[in-house]
Image (spheres, rainbow, N blue to C red):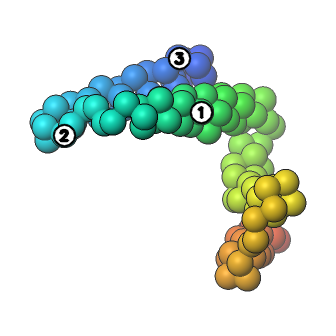
Amino acid sequence: MRDEREVIDKLFYNFALSSLAVIVYILLRRLPLFVAEAQVLKGILGGLYVGIFEMGLTFILWMKALEYAQSTARVANMIFLTPFVSLLFIQFALGESVQLATVIGLSLIVLSNILQKMK
């Protein structure tokens, strides 16, 4: 948050440098760049989805929330609650089952945040 550049600029440089590092790694390891044609489209579409929704927009929204927050500590603690909300979405919207161990783990996360706020 101390970095005064625009959020989108910071994220762009981060992802650009990371992409360059991945390309260098692939070239140095001499890994195959292409696979069967049927899987290329799935890979591109999957990469676009992750890049836009899971990495791009979510990071921009998160950084904007931190910029406008009166207390970044309060907003930062919310990141620990998002997996719980995701599990609710997975169970009710997607119809997938959620295991007891997962619920216990998330409960411990929520409990730790509550204890932290009490101190």
Report which residue position mark 1 lands on.
Answer: 49
Crowd class of label 3 (few under 14; some 14 to 19; many from 20; radius 10 Å): few
Is residue 1 rendered to the left or right of residue 24? Answer: right
Q: Residue at x 47, y 29 (%)?
A: 41
Under mark 1, the amino acid is: Tyr
Task: Choose mark 2 or mark 3, whichever is in front.
Answer: 2
Pointer 2 or 3: first along the chain: 3
Observer-nearest of 24 and 61: 24
- The numbered disc on residue 9 is 3
Identify which residue is drawn at 31% across, 36% down: 35
Q: Position of residue 90 (x, y in %)?
A: 77, 58
Name the residue tied to disc 2: 31
Kind of residue sitting beneath label 2: Leu
Q: Is residue 52 left or right of residue 93?
A: left
Q: Is residue 46 left or right of residue 78?
A: left
Check disc 3 and report its element: helix, strand or loop.
helix
Circles 1 and 3, Cβ within 8 Å, touching? The answer is no
